[in-house]
DNA sequence: GATGAATGAGCCTTCATTCAT
DNA sequence: TATGAATGAAGGCTCATTCAT
């Protein structure tokens, strides 16, 4: 799983100093939150002058948005891929459970590689309208439609109960996020048996909506 | 369902000005977050002098903790009641589903009456060690043990599958919170059919763990 | 040696609450200084409401002045007494040394009974024009004239060298204060042999100016 | 006599703004005292923004300590010099009176060049434990030992009476400080004949302890 | 007279942002 | 492009003083 910072670097053509700034910001903000992290602290940890931050990012909020926006996209990445729906329909995933299985494992690995970024996203989403807007746009234009199509597909195959799609999505997302938040944020140090937990999570969802 | 502010007033014997302060703080902090809300703004909205806040709460953080701590307790209130476990064992809830049904409806009403407070709790939990400590204490000493006993009880009756209790609890909590966060925070203005949603949530949980 | 607070009580006709206020103020201000002592703290230690202080003293500064002013007078008290100069001239003190001896012992005892008050006077004199004015008035109208007459008297008797009176006074005061400040403020816990120290102080002054 | 601010500038490598801040702080604090001087006032007089003060000094107290600490050292400077005791023993000062003479004149000039700083030291010593600690350390490790050696030396030469060293030191310090406080602080505007006053002060000390 | 809740001016301090070098 | 000293608005908090009870 490609690291988000790799993605950033390629997408945005970042200089080495910029990379240091972003890395420092991610570390500090994910640990202490946006409002408890000062730009001077970010600069210090990044090994640059405070002014350098503002040469690359107009404001502190700009830096946050730059960091968080791609995460929103990437976290839902599989659902974006044109081929995602194609694959569903081309029987790449014979059963909904196969799709769910692939989806969870893929998102689990992504989360594992990007814990700090996801912490930031979850924590700051509540406070920054810019982030909310970005999230809503991605969700309603990409995530929801892709999910919708797939769900309709498996409903017709008789693999999903006749529940409102929103309810099914909510159930899937709640169970996955509920697991991951426990796994990576609340009890990261617990001795987890990931394989079993993932299987159980899939099973619980399937029993509910399948 | 008694309003939290009622509870605060009675428990803490608050003066009218104090009530205004707490009300203003809840409104503002739930809307904009703790760090975006200044004490001068709270004072203005409460119709008191800024100094008055500090006569009643030593620090701004103190005010937050005073607001949030009882919510932690109250949100888990049913599980506290000595009689909760008693009731379970005395066959008040013949089936696990009955218990779940009672629990969800009760918590739904509580949430409905205290949306701003619950928003504050969820939003600020990440940033304030004091709140985390308070939450952890309540969870591990009260919520978890009560849940545990009840789950064991219904397991023996064969109504719950042989999953780890933690997994069962996580499933219950994830689905309930997932619903409520959507219902009250993300899409509060949507035209919800609460009765149906609640039934579905219960059903989804029961299918998963039952 | 009558305690200053006794004097205050008699002179000012103070109520019991007032006495408590003044006592608390003296304790706290002498320990921590005027600016580090809040009126709320004084009220608490005095066991009265904060408002009560302002019923008796228009301002906090007023309270300080009320406390300090009589100390200025009392510290120079012997020199005030009409009879002081009389006594000198009526040969009560045959030699300057006798006078000095009586004076130092008397002032030593006074200081010993009123350490906190004298600390306050010395510490706050620098910052409060009101106190300075009071001090200057007493010094130039009472202390200096009385000293002057006595010094002239013993000069004529050939017991004092022909130094400017101001220099003689400064020497006397410097040596006495130098001793007392060490004795009561800088090293109050040292194991002092007061009798010897006093005799030495007298001797040092006499050798200098005698 | 090098001005203290010169010393500060060299020792601490201060920027021009810093020098202005320190100068303004010295002026204001010596006039009105630490607690009557606000940082905004210091900034205004220094011609800098208030924030600039805190870029150079972490707290207001820090600024005070930075100003006062070197004064404690410098005021006792001659006694520090390795050569001071050497000089005494190498007969640079044949008689105690020569030493005292050199010492007083040197300290007189220092005081004259640094009146505001010495006022601050004397005034604030009472209220700031940090300053007290610094003073005590210098006094007990440097001033007292140097004085001690010199006194013992002249005692053996028969030039000082057999008084406790502490008493001799107290007499010297009391008389010198007594003179200087009158000269520079209490009556700075009087028309002083410094030469005569200094000679008299020396004479009074020598008569007392010699 | 006594109370103590309420006031609000003023303080110290932080920090995102600017700009001359 | 990078620096980091300087800025100044804004924030949390203290405390002498007032006043209705």
Image: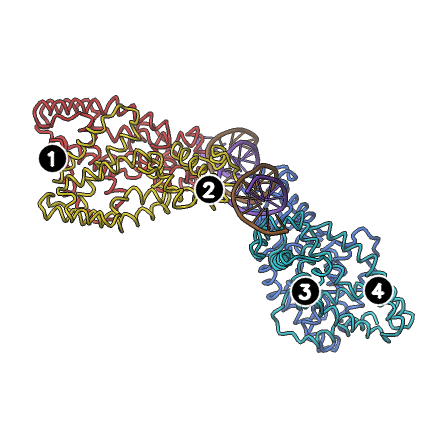
Chain colours: A cyan, B blue, C red, D yellow, E purple, F brown
Check the picture and name the quadrant holding the C terminus of chain B: bottom right
As helix, strand or loop, the secondary structure at mark 2 comes to loop
Give the spatial CA distance, label 2 vs label 4: 63 Å
Residue denoted by label 2: D15
Observer-side mark, 1 or 3, equals 3
Residue denoted by label 4: A147
| Chain of the residue that carries numbered disc 1 in the rendered image | C
Give the spatial CA distance, label 3 vs label 4: 23 Å
As helix, strand or loop, the secondary structure at mark 3 comes to loop
As helix, strand or loop, the secondary structure at mark 4 comes to helix
Are discs 1 and 4 both within one chain?
no
Observer-side mark, 3 or 2, equals 2
The one nearer the camera, B126 or D37, is D37
Give the spatial CA distance, label 1 vs label 3: 86 Å
Question: A185 left or right of D206?
Answer: right
Residue denoted by label 3: A114
Question: F8 left or right of A7?
Answer: left
Give the spatial CA distance, label 3 vs label 2: 45 Å
| Chain of the residue that carries numbered disc 3 in the rendered image | A
Observer-side mark, 2 or 4, equals 2
Q: Is residue D135 above or below residue D182?
A: below
Are discs 2 and 4 both within one chain?
no
Q: Residue at 11% of width from left, 35% of height from top?
A: C207
Are discs 1 and 3 both within one chain?
no
Residue A30 in sight in this render = no
Q: Are marks 3 and 4 in contact (CB under 8 Å)?
A: no
The one nearer the camera, A21 or D164, is A21
Residue denoted by label 1: C207
Residue A28 percent coordinates (x, y):
60, 57
Q: Are marks 2 and 1 in contact (CB under 8 Å)?
A: no
Give the spatial CA distance, label 1 vs label 4: 105 Å
The one nearer the camera, B164 or A200, is A200
């Amino acid at each position: 799983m490609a690291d988000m910072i790799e993605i950033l670097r390629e997408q945005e053509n970042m200089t080495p100093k910029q990379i240091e700034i972003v890395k420092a910001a991610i570390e500090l903000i994910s640990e202490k939150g946006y409002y408890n992290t000062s730009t001077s602290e970010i600069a210090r940890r990044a090994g640059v002058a405070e002014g350098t931050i503002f040469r690359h990012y107009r404001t502190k909020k700009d830096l946050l948005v730059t960091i968080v926006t791609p995460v929103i996209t990437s976290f839902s990445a599989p659902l974006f891929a044109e081929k995602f729906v194609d694959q569903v329909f081309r029987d790449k995933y014979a059963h909904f459970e196969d799709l769910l299985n692939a989806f969870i494992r893929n998102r689990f690995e992504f989360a594992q590689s990007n814990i700090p970024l996801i912490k930031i996203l979850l924590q700051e989403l509540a406070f920054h309208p810019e982030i909310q807007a970005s999230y809503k746009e991605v969700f309603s234009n990409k995530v929801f439609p892709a999910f919708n199509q797939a769900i309709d597909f498996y409903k017709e195959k008789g693999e999903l109960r006749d529940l409102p799609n929103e309810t099914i999505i909510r159930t899937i997302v709640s169970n996955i996020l509920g697991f991951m938040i426990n796994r990576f944020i609340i009890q990261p140090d617990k001795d987890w048996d990931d394989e079993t937990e993932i299987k159980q999570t899939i099973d619980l969802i399937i029993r509910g909506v399948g």
